[in-house]
Amino acid sequence: MKNKHILYTICALMISMVSCKRDSYLDRAPLSDISPQKFFKNETDLQLYCNQYYSALPQQNFLRMDDNSDDKANQTISTLLANTYTVPSAASSTDLPGTGAVSAGTTPVAGTGTNWNFALIRTCNFFLANYSKADLPEATKNVYVGETLFFRANDFWKKVKAFGDVPYVNKYITDTSSSVLYGARMPHQQVMDSVLKDLNFAVANIPVTPSQDGRLTKYAALALKARVCLWEGTYRKYFNAGDPTPFLQGAVDAAEQIMTSGLFKIYNTGHPQTDYYNLFIQEELQGNSECILPMRYLLNILTSDIDRQLGQSGDGYSKNFVRSFLCTDGLPYSLSPLYKGDDTPDDEAQNRDPRYKQQIATRGFDLLNGDLITLPRIGTTNTSTGYQCIKGRSNSQLAWTASQDTYDFFIFRYAEILLIDAEARAELGSCTQSTLDNTINLLRDRVGMPHMVIAGLVKDPKSDFPALPVLLDEIRRERRIELGSEGFRFDDLHRWKAGTLINNPETILGMKLTPALKAQYPASQVSNITVDANNYIRVYPNFTARVWSDKLYLFPIPTGEITLNPQLKQNPGW
Amino acid sequence: MKLTTLLIILFNLNVVASGFSQTKVTLNMKSADFKKVISSIQKQSDYHFIYSESNLPTIRRIDINVQNAEVPGVIANLLANSGFKFSELPNHLIVISATGTEMAVVKFTGKVVDEKGQPLPGATVRIKGAKTGASTDTNGFFTLDAPDNSILTVSYIGYNDKDVTASGSAPLLIALVPEAKSLTEVVVVGYGTQKKVNLTGAIATVNADKLDSRPMVNLGDGLQGLIPNLNVNLNSGQPGQGASFNIRGLTTLAPGSTDLTTTSPLILVDGVARDPNLIDPNDVESVTVLKDAASASIYGSRAANGVMLITTKSGKKGPTRVTYSGSYTISRPTQLADQVNSGDYIKMFNYANRSGQQSGGYTTDPFTARDSTLAAAYRADPANNPTGYPDPGNPKKYRYVGNTDWVKELYPGWAPQQQHNVSVSGGEEKTTYAAGMGYFKQEGLQESAKQVYQRYTPSLKVNTDVNKWLTFNFNMSLTHIDNDQPAATRINQGGPGNGSWLTAGLPPTMPIFNPDGNGHYAGQGNYTNPMAVNALSGRDIDNQNDFWTTGRIIVKPVDHLSVVADYTFNTFSEFEKANMIPYNEYGVDGQFLSVFPWTNPSQVSENRQNNTYKSLNTYATYENTFAGKHYVKALVGYNQEYYHYRLSNATARNLIDPTLPAIGINTDTKPVVGGVETESALIGSFSRLNYIYDNRYLIEVNARYDGSSRFPANDKYVFSPSVSLGWNIANEAFMKNIKNTVNELKIRASYGQLPDQLTPGRTRSVQDRNGAMPGAISYGNISSYAQYPYIPTQLTGTVPYLIGGQPGTTVRAPTLLSSNQTWEKVQTKNIGLDFAFLNDKLNGSFDYFINNTKDILVNSLQLPAVLGAATPPSNSADLRSKGWELSLNWKDKALDGDLHYAVTLSLSNNSNTKVTRYAGNPTNNLGDFRVGQELGEVWGYTNTGYYKTDAEAQAVDNSALAGYKWLAGDIKYADLNGDGKINYGNSTLANHGDLKVIGNQTPHNRFGLNLNASYKSWDFTTFFQGVLSHRFYPNEYTFYAFRDDEYSIPSTYSTDYWTPENPNAFFPRVRFSGGGNEQAQDKYLLNAAYARVKQITLGYTLPKVLTNKMKMQRLRVYVTGANLFTITSLNKNYDPEVVGFNTYPLNKSIAFGLQASL
């Protein structure tokens, strides 16, 4: 039968198919993804990889920053300072509440900050383990090693601030049984010594003029170094935790390298009543003399939603913060004859450091497109205390439109460098009048305030730091005023070991709401507002004061992490 | 005269030999007798001889040598001068008789009817043994010329053959009896069919008769509850939403999360893997579910979670048949939560705010006294009071004081849907065909969204028998889908497409339009008004084409053997275009406020997919019975599959004309472009052997050897063996006497092991493995990780930081993968019983199974976060589940055969799904899987009422649950470990504080009850479905008032809350984000058991007399109600079938339908 031939053919065909393995058919590799073997060939690869770190840059965007401090009393009480923060069970990738500057952009990238997440550190370590494959001159490669170390140092520093001792991982781990994962925490000082080493490498290898607009510059690296060194130097001093001098000196060195470069200058157009305010609503900070590194926003390319949120963030400066503004004679309210008292908002703002009206919404401030402030907008989402924060807040309708805000923010601002230099020198005992003239007095010139003159300094009887030498005390005041809402305050309280400042009831009080003033408001708007015996607004009717506990200097480690690695010991008090 | 017939069938397989007309023969015989010669002729041709055995030509030695000679001529030559003559009747009957005698040839007429007396058109009437005969006409009548006293065999598919002796000229009335189904029913199994009585695995089938009677949106609707342990999840009532399927519960764990993975079976439509949600349910002929490893293992590593085999309808020989079925349905949600009115809302809102103020919890701006007064005025007299007034804090904006029932506004009425299906089928001689066109249109439940979903399903099936040993088979089908919905889906702002039915933060105080009468939508930037988004912000239009072609050759080269080869090509293409149009928001007196942020800037995004799938199957089957007792069927085959996915997307912002959805017309300096391309391949060779001894002892052995591209080089191949046994007790000699009582009784047992090729990569998307990654594209299984789970890759994306004036492009670090991950394996033991009693009136089956899944790919170990990467998965967990399923059918008639009824009950349970090995959790953390854990268990606190005073509340350390101060009216949990604190210890098994297992959320004991009855022309079907035991912990904001924050709108159900005046309320004191009261706890573990009338149908079939007059075969009209009644004690916010809040609700519906055939 002829059919048999067909049968045999088919059978043979099938048997051959059945019996053979067809690796060629089964070997499939990614068609649209990058494989690590083929990466890190050239400078572009190094750049593309390093780009991912940039979203970890801290920007001073004013939005609910300094919540965990004596500067602010927001609608909702800070859980940390109210001592209601609970120990998390698992490591989170979001920043801990109010622990300083948020990351760039609207979506913070996982694992970049004050949290028990080491993703960014791993990302950096992967680079360090692989970058040398690129066929490039050592100097070129070192630029990107410098960028990597900059970000790794920044992240470790943030972790040290949050947790104290932290596990120091500086290798790319592929073996998950590695003992590194189960080690003890490295002491604070040791981690910070490594951080300083990394920063020094970054400073030495990152060029002054970057290969691409927006990349880190040598001065950005120096700025971070100055910031970190001041923090660590003063921390060591006030916590009696090692020799502060190398760090304080490092801060001075870094700051003065920036100052002597001649590239930066305080933004000053000769309008003391507006320059300071205007500095924070700049469409373009690139090229601004005060800007060391900007967080830029461009219409249709990258925009933020900050301006609109600043108008309705329900926050407010505390009474305590407002009191710290000097009067225009350079004296604190407790000493100055110019102080008019605080029975009305207008009185309180009169004769004060011009930065007062440039940071707090006072009469005549245009909140939005002609919506002028008459009375502070208490009883609304605008402000909790009556001292509505207006840094970065413009009256522009366009900027207010959601996600259409293109105002740039500072990542590193020259003013901070000047304040670092003054403070570090004061701590070292080397702050002279010429130091002040080159630093703080430049800031005062912008706003038309009298110079700080060492010889003429009088100790404020109401000072928050009664024991502190008057020079250091006033430098700290200048820092608080100049950097208000920029996210430095909790870190400052930490390094100065000054957590007890939050015990001051004035840190959770708002403006004075006398019956006379109250009568000027529609009754229904202010009917829910509680005041204390002296008519100051009590933002939290059930708290008369917060109680500091030293455990709050450090955050707790997630319990799950301690269960996994018994070598980790919980921070004291948690 | 005694007549005998001879019958020899050349091909005993499925060759439809009667279709050929063979009239010529080739004979080369020497010294043959006459009988032998005509026997040869009968073999070669269609001719059949009728003669008297005792009266044949006695020619002994015939030498004959003819080539291709016509039979009558050959016979004439043979009979020449033999004293015999012949006469030829129609249908190739040749009557041989002695010259002298006259054989009476009669023209018989008759009618063939079914058991109800209805005519059976197309029944075959033959002289017994003959290959051909007559067919009955549409009224069941036939005429046939045959010798008097012939035995006529009448046959009809689905009925027992009947022999009648025909004599005389009186018309015959022949009533056929349906076959005893249990004995003859043929079931589709992997790569073939099998008699149901011979099955040894756990297999269940549903045929068109059950599916036809109900109007289905998709197949999931129709299958729900019909097959025990085929768990159908309808997901939601969203137009276009498909059902998901699961067989026998969970077989794997999801690495990296404690979410339970729903494992989907392999679903094959006519032998190829297809999405069952994309086929027209009207086209489905039958669905077979292969539940145990033994029956599924022929599909190897694709079948670890069972197999569903869907067979579509094909043409049948006979006159052309045109069938139309159509229905018009109106539907509305089964269940919608009820939000509070403005009065309760303001009251609860301010109460929550006070709670926060008193305890250092979440606080916000409260409603003022003026708000309450004005809101009350509006509620009392809406016509004369405004819904808002200028905000003193911001005079451009309104403070809203209206009273909007958003649920009612968004879901006001019934949404229509319709479906139509026309099919033409038939065929004669060698070719049969079936062509069809289906159309389905559904409008969404959310009225203002104006969603329209349309599906077109043309199909064509052709079958040609080229000759006796070669058949060609061609199937083509296309599914075209148009789905038009608002762009709101894109921004997750309350459109119907994101699966949620109501956006959060729609306070009742907000009106739909601003109070100034300018016609501006309310919202003012603070709130998303879904009515505004739906009306103003553009559309999202999705078109899909899913095109399938299969070509198949069936060769039957010799007896008992058939060889099949088929090749399938599929292309799936999708084009989705979404246009977002910015719109203005206005405040007091129509003052412009701002542009609604979430649809700004204007943009068009296009998503394209172009996927192909190719598969080749070849297999050979040998089937024979030796010595009458040894039945053997052997199968060997090869299968290969290839998937290629390509997708791309592009988004351009800042359109020159925002309302013109043209991607090229923009001023965007950097449009976003993305794309993914992946492929995967699979090969498998398989074999199966069935042996049956004497219809009593059955054995089946399967083996498959698979290779998959998803595993590394040294681990690509895997073996899947299985064996199953059966003992057909009913066929034992000792059962002979009760054969009519016990028609079938069979015990089955099986064991098999199936690896799962999909395991790595199925359960985690790329994003999960790499953390938040702005700009990275992930499309479920179309991702590098899903297709190459063992190959680390570096993803790209952008960072929100300008480098060179543009957001920086970046290449990320690779994923951490384990180098030695390998296959998971599911081992299934199954024992079953099939039975049929009382002449098949009662039949059913019972199965008990144990599934052991070995080497589940999970996170190898919980690793310290210091690693900085997601823990790589490794094969380090086992899972065991047990379960059973029972199905019972009772079928009978009553009232003198006028009433036919059938009851089908299915019951199933898969219980005790336990983790038996899990290396990933050495600390036995409760937040992860652990050994001994029963899946679905809920750890919670014991509710002992409320704290009566603030002092009592603050005396207890509750700080682990919530940091705020606890107050009177907060929940007092039992301090189980007596340490004076309420806490979760360190959340491990060893130290779980005051937590205990308070219940299990796995649904248990599902049932389905199907009732069919027909009385004369009326038919009635109803179907109940439900779950007998199900606990549900509703951690959702419709349950707890303000669970998340101030933007969670409470439901009317949550108004029974604690106040000093209402100390015995069901809910505690109202708080914003009151986490302490929202802990899992026994009091709020709800009973979600339910029984639901899924369907109730009444149909009427026009009597034959009438349809005949209309020249139609059949005309039926029906009305169906779906999901109309539900019995449950569950909170009215939930539909017990899709527990979980904020899912687009299921529909209840009423349908009117028509089925007609010509």
Image (cartoon, helix red, strand yellow):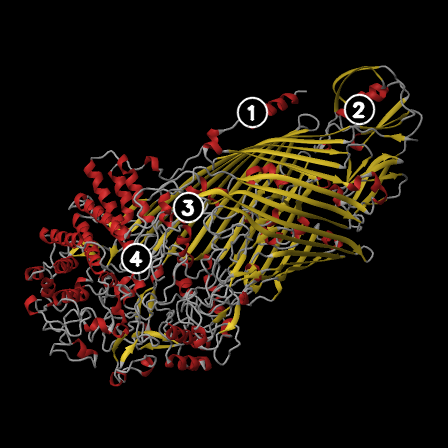
Looking at numbered disc 3 in the image, what kind of residue is underneath it? Answer: Thr
User: Which residue is the site of mark 1?
Assistant: A16
Sequence order check, earlier mark of 2 and 3: 2
The reply to whether dot 3 and dot 4 touch (C-beta < 8 Å) is no
Amino acid carrying mark 4 in the image: Ala
Depth-wise, is mark 1 or mark 4 nearer the camera?
4
Distance in Å between CA atoms under marks 4 and 2? 106 Å
Q: Is residue B26 above or below residue A91?
A: above
Give whichever of discs 1 and 4 has the lower sequence position. 1
Q: Nearer the viewer, residue B122 or B787?
A: B787
User: Dot 4 lies on which element?
Assistant: helix
Residue picked out by circle 2 = B72
Dot 2 falls on a residue whose secondary structure is: helix
Mark 3–mark 4 Cα distance, whole angstroms, equals 24 Å
On the question of residue A430 being in view, the answer is yes
Cα distance between the residues tagged 2 and 3 = 84 Å
* For the residues bearing labels 3 and 1, Cβ distance under 8 angstroms: no
| Chain hosting mark 4 | A
Q: Is residue A303 visible?
A: no
Chain containing mark 2: B
Chain letter of the residue carrying label 1? A
Of labels 3 and 1, the one closer to you = 3
- Residue beneath the point at 41% across and 49% down: B768
Element at badge 3?
A: loop
Quick check: marks 2 and 3 in contact, CB under 8 Å? no
Residue nearest the observer in this picture, A408 or A553: A553
Instruction: Name the residue beneath numbered marker 4.
Output: A162
Report the residue marked by disc 3: B871
Q: Position of residue A256 (x, y in %)?
A: 11, 53
